[in-house]
Image: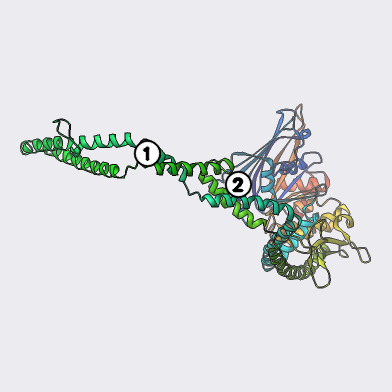
Amino acid sequence: MLEELRITGLGVIDDTTLRLTTGMNVITGETGAGKTMVVTGLGLLFGGRADAGRVRADPGRAVVEGRLRLSGAPADAVTTRITDAGAEVDDDGTVLLSRTVTIEGRSRAHVGGRSMPVAMLGEVGEQVVAVHGQSDQLRLLRPAEQRAALDRFAGPEHEKLLETYREAYSRWRTVVDDLADRRRNARERTQEADLLKLGLDEITRVDPQPGEDDELRAEVQRLEHAEGLRVAAALAAQALTGGMEVTDETPDATQLLGTARRTLEAQATVDPALGDLAARIEEAATLVDDVSAELSGYLSALDADPARLETIYERRAALRALTRKYADDVDGVIAWADHARSRLALLDSSDELLDELDRERQRLAGTVAELAARLTAARVEAAGRFSEAVSVELAGLAMPHARVEVAVVPRAAGKDEPAVPAEDRDLGVGPDGADEVELRLLAHPGAPSLPLQKGASGGELSRVMLAIEVVFAGAGGPPTLVFDEVDAGVGGQAAVEIGRRLARLARTHQVLVVTHLPQVAAFADRHLVVAKDTGGAVTTSGVRIVEDTERARELARMLAGLPDSDLGIAHAEELLAVAGREKHQ
């Protein structure tokens, strides 16, 4: 839920903070006071289009900040997306969002204290908030959202079936696209495969081994300098142990170390420190012996065979021929060969493989068709339940003869899109099934069934959308719902019913309502008033919470335009009492 919203420099709002609560938050105020700027600020905060014309000249930028508490179904998805982008969620489970728009039209966004693309705010907004208003592109007027909403309404078992279908559809499309590509590009694939085979044949004949070029380079260096290496190793061995032919009377290192150790050990009883040094000399003598043994082995293995050197020269020439064509080194050549083998498997356009892929395509098509038929049946059943539930709600909203229908119609296959053969026709399947879903309204008996946006007036559409949201309330969707004067064109008992249903919706969602109807405002859990200040050189507006008698005065103003009228206040108090009883039923 949205706990707090601060708006600075937007329209008539100079600097104000809205502290929101769970349940139903109502925003009221005089015409032109800036109520709509609150909804505009929400739109900016959640990635909406920035309009530089709404930015106040002083201070020259508009800033909208919000504290969002992540809870409920979308919390995990939003948290994961935010943390993957490098932002942080606070320890108390909240995250700070910010949007800045300058008077020049530049826009910046921050999430969790980190600069982000504005699109990130939009991604978060899709998960946590839905805005309804007569001037908005309403979410539930989009066919894809209507289908998704019906799927949520159908229940968890239906959503599991939908997930199973999507997996099968993905496998089928992969095979279909692969088969079509192999058939369409058979000539190009064959040419590429021939080139890869030539390269693989050349590499296979040479048979390079991992790291072989480095090993051969080192061996060549040893063979080319074999005499110098032998002399150095022999002299070193002679100096250490005298094991080689001695040309002078100088004692070797082993003899000198032995003399030093024995001399110190003779005095170790007088000073133990000399005994410790003697022990360390003994360790050095042991190390000298080890080195001497390794030098002897090195001399024995040292090879100066000219034939071996010539063989290595030839081998290195063969490896260089490969590295000139395929990679910078032998390991790269081996990697190229591995990739070529994998690519060859993908390029295979043999009749045998094509027949095998075609059989797999047909098998998966049958699975997709069967699952799509089950999805259609489930949607038709859910559409009937949904239609009845919404029609009941409409009767309570002063539209007793109206009826909402959910049309589940076959989906037409798109251009260049494969279809799935079924018993009586080819199915135009997509990632969500073989159906298009459309909400339609019958405004009165005998009226044609028309899409919502064509079959309802502004006031009717507001009530229809509210009835739909009430029915969908238990079927998931964003946890915060914003209604911007959806009660326009409504009055009397219908207004009371709108307030009652918004209050019912607020039992499971956070609801923000911008309204001009006191019958609706009376049901609020928190009532905020946008007030205009014309005392200065520039008109500004701010938002404050009203409670108790002040709230009754605001309702009286909405009822009769007279906040100090005793009769108006009495009527307002009666409204509050009725709403209070309704909310606790």
Image vertical order of residue 121 relative to residue 15, above or below? below
Discs 2, 1 touching: Cβ within 8 Å: no
* Residue on which disc 1 sits: 222
| Residue 449 x, y percent position in the rendering | 89, 63
User: How many marks are shown on the rendered structure?
Assistant: 2
Q: Amino acid at mark 2?
A: Ile
Q: Is residue 423 left or right of residue 248?
A: right
- Could you say which is closer to the camera, residue 259 or residue 172? 259
Q: Is residue 416 visible?
A: yes
Q: Amino acid at mark 1?
A: Arg
Q: Is residue 89 left or right of residue 361?
A: left
Check disc 2 and report its element: helix, strand or loop: helix
Q: Is residue 92 visible?
A: no
Quick one: label 2 or label 1, which is nearer the N terminus? 2
Q: Residue at x 59, y 39 (%)?
A: 113
Residue most extreme to the right: 446
| Residue 71 x, y percent position in the rendering | 61, 54
Check disc 1 and report its element: helix, strand or loop: helix
Instruction: Determine which quarter of the picture holds residue 106.
Output: top right
* Residue 583 numbered mark, or none: none
* Residue 82 numbered mark, or none: 2
Q: Residue at x 81, y 55 (%)?
A: 141
- Could you say which is closer to the camera, residue 184 or residue 389? 184
Image vertical order of residue 242 relative to residue 162, above or below? above
Q: Is residue 331 left or right of residue 272?
A: right
| Residue 363 x, y percent position in the rendering | 71, 69
Query: Tag 1: Cα neighbours inside 10 Å, few (<14), some, or many (≥20)?
Result: some
Task: Estimate the spatial distance between the alpha carbons at disc 2 and disc 1, rounded to whole Å.
Answer: 58 Å
| Residue 218 x, y percent position in the rendering | 41, 40
Instruction: Determine which quarter of the picture holds residue 439.
Output: bottom right
